[in-house]
Structures are given as C-alpha cells and as structure tokens.
Amino acid sequence: MLSIKQHTKLKNQRRILKSLLISSFILFSVIVKADGNWSISKHDTACYHNPLFFSKAPLIDNERFLKAVTLGLDANFNRNDILAGLSLGLQTTKRNFSLYAGYNIRPKAKTVYVENGFNTFYKYNEGRSFAYINLEKRFGYEVLFSQIGVLVGVKYTYSFGKYRGTNISYDPLHIYMPFYLKEDGEKHFIPPVVGIFWMNPDAIFKITYEYVDLQMPDQPEYTSVQFPSISNHRICVSFVYCFNFSLDVGF
C-alpha cells in the first residue's frame, strides 16, 4: 500500500505530466495558426532558414508548417554515468521550434546498493532507460552558410529499468524540466533544458545541460560500504539529421 505522501506525490506527477502535454499541444497549435500570411522563399529549407528570405505574402497551398522529419543520435552523460540512444523529431519552418521523442539506454549496468534493514544491503547491477519527449526553441545567428545560437526547452523523461540478472524492477521516475514544487515546506526547482547548437540545411549538432535526479541512496554513516554516486548535473550531446520534404508536394 502506498502512503499518503506517496499518493500525493504520484497525483502531483500525473497532474504535471498532463499540464505539460496540454501546454505543448496548445503551444504548437498557436504556432501553426500564428503569422499565417508569412511566405517562405525557395531559399528556405526544413531545418535552417535565413530571415532575409522571409517576405510578406499570401500563404500558398504548397507551404507547410512542418518541413522535416529528423533522426538523431544522442548521449546523456556525466562523469560517472552515461546513457545513449536514438530520437525522432519534427522541425518547423516558423519560430525555430523542434519536437523530439527519444529512447536512451545505459550500455553498462551501474552497481548500486539497496538497503534491506539496518546495516544490511543488497548489491545489484542496475540497468536504466530514459524515454523522453522534448520541445525546443532555438535562437540563432547566421555564420557563413550555417547557423549557431542558444536553445531552451521543456522536457519530460520517464526513467525506468530493473536490476540485471533478476526480475526485480525499481520504482520508475517521472522527471520534468522545468519543474517547481513546494512540498513539506521545501521548494524544489529544476531548470529548463538549455544549451547551444550549430546547424546547416541538413543537420543539427547541439549540446545541452539537464538536471536529472535519479534519487540514488545517500551514503550511510554507519557502514564502511562505499556507495556509488551519480551527479544530478548532466550533459546531452546530440547529432540530428534532417529529412527535408519537397516544397512541391503537400504535407
């Protein structure tokens, strides 16, 4: 049975996830409807656009909001942990927005100790996966035939897995960025995803910072067992390739 505190926490997580998904849907709907009379010239591509090529004109049938599907490779890591995987995404021609969904897996199990009574610990090899959805906004500047700049994003990550060699699964984590919660008089704030990027008409390379608390057990004072630690500060490096749609065919 879950305690009242656990029920409250689970309820808050579901409420925040629902709010995040609804906000993302509303935001994309607003973007689609906004500035419907902007025309994009033939110099524009799916992943990269030059503001100098924008012109005010009636919207024509072969212009689309979504211009590319993307396939990406990413690694989410810090000095003592790494997960890597793939992502699929959508790029917009307006507002420089990107929407990604991805899956990362820890290639090598991490040793953890799980307390089972006073001064008694079980040693496990923990496998872990991340499934995530991420909405990003880019702010870029042109440099020769490419674009560089900064980005900010909102992200939801579902972290789950089990202990290798067993059928034991640990409690999954729901990780929100940004996140704010006041619980038991304490304020908890997790910043949004922030980073830098470089892009050309066919590809995007980006490096972002994320705050991810995997809730590793603290080092007990009454044992000599050295607990492994994983920092909450992580770097995500991504390479994304854009499959551009033809401007002559409707989406």
Image: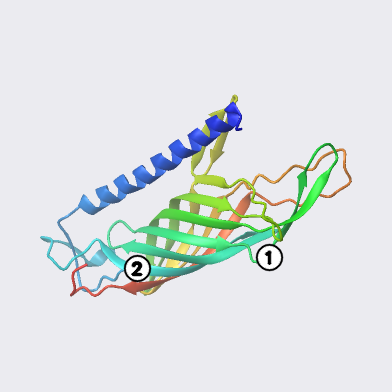
The residue lying at 53 percent from left, 36 percent from top is 10
Q: Is residue 49 visible?
A: no
- Percent from the top left, x then y, of residue 56? 14, 60
What amino acid is at disc 1?
Lys
Residue at the disc numbered 1: 108
Name the one closer to the observer, 120 or 241: 120
Q: Position of residue 55 (x, y in %)?
A: 17, 63
Say whether residue 163 is left or right of residue 7.
Answer: right
Which residue does the image show at 39% across and 63% down from the upper left? 89
- Give the label on residue 238, or none: none
**Residue 99 in which image quadrant:** bottom left
> For residue 242, what is the image quadrant?
bottom left
User: Relative to residue 103, is residue 244 drawn left or right?
Assistant: left
Closer to the camera in the image, 114 or 182: 114
| Mark in front: 2 vs 1 | 1
Nearer the N terminus, badge 2 or badge 1?
2
Is residue 180 shown left or right of residue 120? Answer: left
Which residue is under mark 2?
69
Classify the position of the C terminus by image quarter.
bottom left
**Is 183 above or below relative to 91?**
above
Badge 1 crowding class, 10 Å Cα cut-off, few under 14, some 14 to 19, many 20 or more, is: few
Picture coordinates of residue 118, whole percent (x, y):
84, 36
Q: Position of residue 172 (x, y in %)?
A: 58, 47
Question: How is the structure coloured here?
Answer: rainbow
| Image: 145 above or below 206 | below
Number of numbered discs on residues: 2
How far apart are the alpha carbons under marks 2 and 1? Answer: 30 Å
